[in-house]
Image: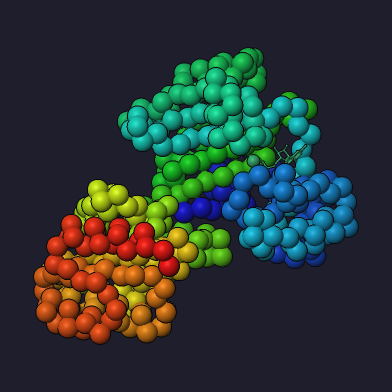
Amino acid sequence: MKVHEYQAREILARYGLPVVAGDVAATPQEARAIAERMGRPVVVKAQVHVGGRGKAGGIRPARTPAEAEAVAGEILAMELKRIPVRRVLVAEAVEVDREFYLGVVMDRAARRVVVMGSAEGGVEIETVAREKPEAIVRQVADPFLGLREYQARTLAFDLGLSGTQALSFAPIAMALYRAYVENDATLAEINPLAWTRDGQWRALDTKMLLDDSARPRHPEWEALRDPESEEPAELQARLHDLNYVKLEGNIGCMVNGAGLAMATMDTIQLYGGTPANFLDIGGGARAEKVAAALRIILADPNVRAVLFNIFGGITRCDEVARGIVAALGAVCPRVPMVARLVGTNEEEGRRILAGARMLTTESMAEAARMAVEVSRKPR
Ligand code: GDP
Ligand code: MN
């Protein structure tokens, strides 16, 4: 789950990270009031879940409260990468001497949390990684001991820092690591971490991603969620408690059970096709949930065929078939469909589907092969 800069900023401030003063505003008047309260030049920043806001015009300085109001008005009227801006962060403007990058991420290959730094701050780290990988320094945190102090200092020295600059950098890296672990984040990033003209560290931009798998132990996350910035398909999937991941292929899959869904994707690949999604409707899905799942699949413009692979156990084939028929009544299917329904109530399920225009088979391999074949037919 993504959280906005102003939310990440509040979390990180609790760990003593040097975020700049500021507050969030939904109207130009609120922006003006915040600037008045701060009584100094500010930066007005669009709060949308996209990178590169600066380049897109979503970050503008304002010297006076009147200017902050005007600039906020302009930014609040913008869309960044097609997402409307609903809020701005009005933050204290800082005189920057140098910009650094500091991030904590999960390195799945290493099965460790990695703390990364770069003296090429302000730029997206992906760009640095591609064009100048040697400019990124890292330390791997021990899962039991965490990021140790000597590692934080090593990071500072590897960034070319020395003296008070290096000494004051180390606690920032350690605090960011702690914030990452204690908040079940998958990313905690400060970019830029600025060294100011008057010789202080300031976190000018903060970003956090939170691990959705940890949601059950964080009731406070519900308040951080911004439904508008979620992918519509992923939002719908979450609302219906479906396990959905969009992929790049063109065969939509609806499957019950994560293992079977993985096997279905493999089988599609085996026959030369590519899945458009992973979708596990879970055990015991009722018709309404199946209909929601089908609507999500069919909303993907890449989808050229749909494959239903249902192995009825707790899930009843007749319920699934009823859901499919209900969804087909509402969304006019524009692609061929293949259904493989076996297990509990399969005869009833097939009888219900007989009316729908759909290829059916009892073999999973055959179903995958058929789906690949019909996905290639010109429409
Ligand atoms: P992003 O473009 O979405 O990553 O947004 P950032 O918050 O990182 O802002 C982009 C750039 O704006 C930063 O790299 C800074 O160079 C600049 N910036 C942001 N806040 C300030 C500030 O208070 N003072 C100065 N001088 N520059 C700032
Ligand atoms: Mn940034």
Vertical relation: 134 (above or below) 285? above
Residue extending farthest to the front is 378
Residue at image point 68% right, 48% down: 53
Foreground residue among 90 and 366 = 366
- Please tell me how many numbered marks the rendered image carries: 0
Residue at image point 17% right, 68% down: 361
Q: Quadrant of the C terminus?
A: bottom left
In the figure, residue 365 lies in which quadrant?
bottom left
Horizontal and vertical percent position of residue 201: 67, 31
Apparent side of residue 350 relative to residue 162 in the rendered image (left or right): left
Vertical relation: 246 (above or below) 329? above
Horizontal and vertical percent position of residue 3: 54, 53
Residue at image point 57% right, 15% down: 157
Horizontal and vertical percent position of residue 49: 59, 53
Apparent side of residue 1 relative to residue 354 in the rendered image (left or right): right
Does residue 321 appear in the picture of this structure? yes
Q: In which quadrant of this rendering is ligand 1 seen?
A: top right
Residue at image point 60% right, 43% down: 206
What color scheme is it?
rainbow
Horizontal and vertical percent position of residue 1: 47, 54
Apparent side of residue 111 relative to residue 19 in the rendered image (left or right): left
Apparent side of residue 181 relative to residue 324 in the rendered image (left or right): right
Does residue 239 appear in the picture of this structure? no
In the figure, residue 17 lies in which quadrant?
top right
In the figure, residue 355 lies in which quadrant?
bottom left
Foreground residue among 59 and 217 = 59
Vertical relation: 319 (above or below) 140? below
